[in-house]
Image (cartoon, rainbow, N blue to C red):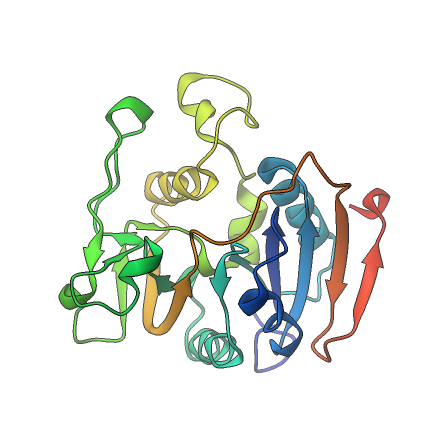
Amino acid sequence: MRYKEDMPNLLLFRGSPRSDIERVEQENPKLPCDKLIIRYMDEFNAYEKARNFFLEHQEYDYLVLATDDIVVKPEHVIQLESDLTLKNYEVLSGIMNVDQPEYMKPEGRLNITYSLALKDKKLRSYEWMCRRDLPEINIFQVKFSGFPLMAIRRDVVESTHFSADGVFKGHAVNMGASLDFVFCWFCHENNIPIFVDKRIDMEHLRGEGVLKNGLMSSKIELMGKDGNSYRVSKDEL
């Protein structure tokens, strides 16, 4: 892929069923890329609408995914953009802690694994990497990364829909959960390497906020690099 400019153009998507974690919300306007924030919508539909919006807007080179409980700061986006400028990665992400109290502790688990868990949910178990076991190199390959500021190149986004884990048992794509897990299996089965940059190290506030999808009307917000917000009609996606 050739970029329209030297720097790749990123669209950061945040599915936000909570929208009440202050440390997350106060950073969003500062992030130096366009942000598509879909609030109070169920996970599958939010991701599907984000994918549609991205595909319809050819000016973007990467769809970047971050859940609504990760504290993403400008320096994280800048590092991601720098990495993607130096190399045209198909998939590249940062790292985050698994549980909130583990952040920055040597024994703390990170939301990345060198091997994929089983597709059968009853047998599924993740072999999380511990912070003390991070390699010396900054960028390295993994098999699973749970959407911690994950950048997906346009051709990869075009090649698959987001799906919930019910697909592993032949159910509809919107049945189940774990869209990140299903996407990583898609990458594995299609020889698409997933890389992470340990310098993009974010705090996961897993225990904060209250889920409001189904309790509040969903809304879609496009926030520019300048921090200004624009409402997007659901009919546009």
Q: Quadrant of the N terminus?
A: bottom right
Q: Is residue 120 visible?
A: no
Find residue 178 and report its image quarter. Answer: top left
Q: How many marks?
A: 0
**How far across and down, in percent of the image, does residue 87 sit?**
41, 74
Relative to 36, is 165 above or below? above
Find residue 5 and report its image quarter. Answer: bottom right
Q: Nearer the viewer, residue 194 or 234?
A: 234
Q: Is residue 179 visible?
A: yes
**How far across and down, in percent of the image, does residue 43 sit?**
58, 39
**How far across and down, in percent of the image, does residue 36 sit?**
68, 59
Residue 54 in the figure: left or right of residue 169: right
Relative to 68, is 104 above or below? below
- The residue drawn where x is 22% and y is 67% is 105
**How far across and down, in percent of the image, does residue 3 sit?**
59, 73
Residue 88 in the figure: left or right of residue 39: left
Q: Residue furthest top?
A: 170
Q: Quadrant of the C terminus?
A: top right
- The residue drawn where x is 57% and y is 80% is 7
- The residue drawn where x is 46% and y is 23% is 166
Residue 134 in the figure: left or right of residue 100: left
Q: Nearer the viewer, residue 37 or 195?
A: 37
Q: Nearer the viewer, residue 162 or 160?
A: 162
Relative to 171, is 218 above or below? below
